[in-house]
Image (tube, coloured by chain):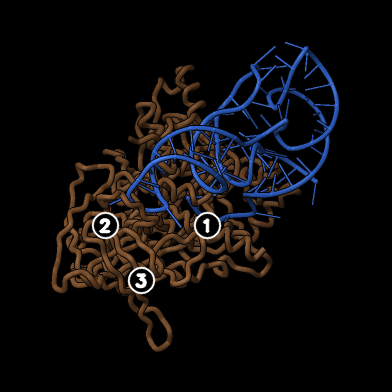
Chain colours: A brown, B blue
Amino acid sequence: MNTTPPATSNFIKTIIEEDLRLGKFNGRVVTRFPPEPNGYLHIGHAKSICLNFGLAREFNGTCHLRFDDTNPIKEEVEYVESIQRDVRWLGFDWNDKLFYASDYFLKLHDYAVELIRRGKAYVCSLDAEQIREYRGTLTTPGKDSPYRDRGVAENLDLFARMRAGEFEEGEHVLRAKIDMASSNVVMRDPVIYRIKKAAHHRTGDVWCIYPMYDFAHCLSDSIEGITHSICTLEFENNRPLYHWILDALETPCHPEQIEFARLNLSYTVISKRKLIQLVRDKIVSGWDDPRMPTISGLRRRGVPPEAIRDFCDRIGVARADSMVDIALLEHCIREDLNARAPRVMAVLRPLKVVITNYPEGQIEELEAPLHPEKADMGTRMIPFSRDLYIEQDDFMEDPPKKFYRLAPGREVRLRYGYYITCRDVIKDAQGRIVELRCVYDPASRGGGTPDNRKVKATLHWVSAAQARPAEVRTYNHLFTVQNPNETLEGQDFRGFVNPDSLEVLSNCLVEPHLALAESGSRWQFERLGYYSVDSVDSTPGALVFNRIVSLRDSWAKIQASEKKTAGG
RNA sequence: UGGGGUGUCGCCAAGCGGUAAGGCACGGGUCUUUGGAAUCCGCAUGCGGAGGUUCGAAUCCUCCCACCCCAGCCA
């Protein structure tokens, strides 16, 4: 049933295949997903997770989950827990390969000492601003620190005292001795250890010096026997340093660093910095707000992990900056849910319909399939009675040519119910339509007639007395522009937040079958879209649904193009 | 004006010297008790530009253009 085309090749697979062919790494493939626990995972991380775990699966290797926790002031256990939950939910298993860079702090420290012994690192006592000045600029070389030629013994002593807590933050740092004139700024004697008198979420106050990313990452990879260290493009400039450090020391293995382009998605932002701003400014309700591109937001919205994985397979992996159309994500979600979500009826904006020729007080239980193409999903009973509700959008008193739903004098089918014909339109004092008087054809029970009469439309509906009230939250794109990152001088991406990204409809009515809907369960509301029972706010007595994604809507398209033509 | 990258359809993306895969989007048809789904058809004489090499170039060479990344004691 799943017609997803086989994943196409990408340059990383090509590299790995070549490595395997050449017998590199003894035929092993070990990757890792190395998040810093300083925020929640988002769809961009999902790309990396699917890539790294997917590669390991495809090449019979392993993939580690490693927390890159070298900066205690930004990191929290809340984040390490959420990250593990999200990776698992996405469907990946690191087995016993759960690691933390902080597990290696002692080893890393010893490597630093060895680097000093080899004359390849020194303690620099310039302050932060001086270091910046000495570093030079992109177009002019830097100059050597006056502390660059300190002797090994002095460096060893100073570094030991840094570790012992004898100095304040910023007084000294440990730097690799490389080349202050390098055209690559990263290589101008990078800082590899700094003093931070902060408690670490795992090591507590055991350490007051912490390794920098460039030092910790390559060595952590090596310690774990990683073969292919896959990261995003912005680390490309750091690759020479990655190799310099591993070459400068005797290490267990020397992984290959491969960079790929990070994911950009239209109509949203994907950067921890910006996402955290949305949370802190209360523009969204939290990391798991269903409008957020976070894994927890997508999960709460009701997006299945399978759809996210499929999406990650389809976007491919390359080195060119790109912006993926969010319509592709929506397509993947629809494709997955179309196959699996049971169908039910819900009326979001109710319009009362009275079937004048239907016996008062009579209730019929109509049996309807839960999935039109999958009989094995079973059926449910739908009550039919004299008083019903249909969608306000499904009636027009004076319909345009292409509108073929209900209108005065017109006959339509009520899905799995009867054919009805509109006879009267009842209005209130303000002229608003409040009720429709219709007649039904008793011979059309179930939705067909003996004379095989055709109708142009089939409407969804609920029976007034048996329907359950519900709140439905309709989500739209979080931003009004394709690329909120593209701001003019003085503008901020928050200025592009879509004021209609959340629409709460609190007078909705759903068919009784939904009374038992489980938290988090996903349904198709026929003719509307896919909806999930909100895992936080929904209760059996007060149902709350999230719209995961709408159905494709060709009527909306027709309306849009008509409007365009008319307005042109 | 330094260094490192990237440019193939509206959006992704294969292609690795033998004559432009696929998906999404878009347009149209069939079918339909969801204007859903399914299904069929259409959609780059063209690969950032200009030269060159070759029987043959998106693929090789030269020059040019555009965009992205780097000057945290962040990752």
Q: Secondary structure at mark 2?
A: strand
Residue at screen point 52% across, 52% down:
A265
> In the picture, which quadrant includes the C terminus of chain A?
bottom right
Label 2 – label 1 distance at C-alpha = 26 Å
- Left of A325 or right of it: where is A448? left
Indicate which disc residue A344 carries: 2
Q: Which residue is mark 3?
A: A349
Query: The N terminus of chain A appears in which quarter of the rendering?
Result: top left
Residue A48 in the image, given as x and y percentages of width and height: 44, 43
Residue position for label 1? A558
Give the number of the mark in front: 3 or 1: 1
In this view, the residue farthest toward the front is: A451
Look at the image and tell me whether residue A514 can be seen: yes
Cα separation between marks 3 and 1: 21 Å
Establish if A395 lies above or below A334.
Answer: below
Q: Amino acid at mark 2?
A: Val
Question: Quadrant location of residue A109?
Answer: top left
Q: Which mark is residue A467?
A: none
Dot 2: few (<14), some (14–19), or many (≥20) neighbours within 10 Å?
many
N-terminal of the pair, mark 3 or mark 1, is 3
Q: Nearer the viewer, residue A247 or B75?
A: B75
Q: Quick one: A556 or A417, which is closer to the camera?
A: A417
Between discs 3 and 2, the one toward the N terminus? 2
Q: Position of residue A437 (x, y in %)?
A: 31, 74
Numbered disc 3: what chain? A
Neighbours of disc 3 within 10 Å: few (<14), some (14-19), many (20+): some
Q: Is residue A515 above or below residue A232?
A: below
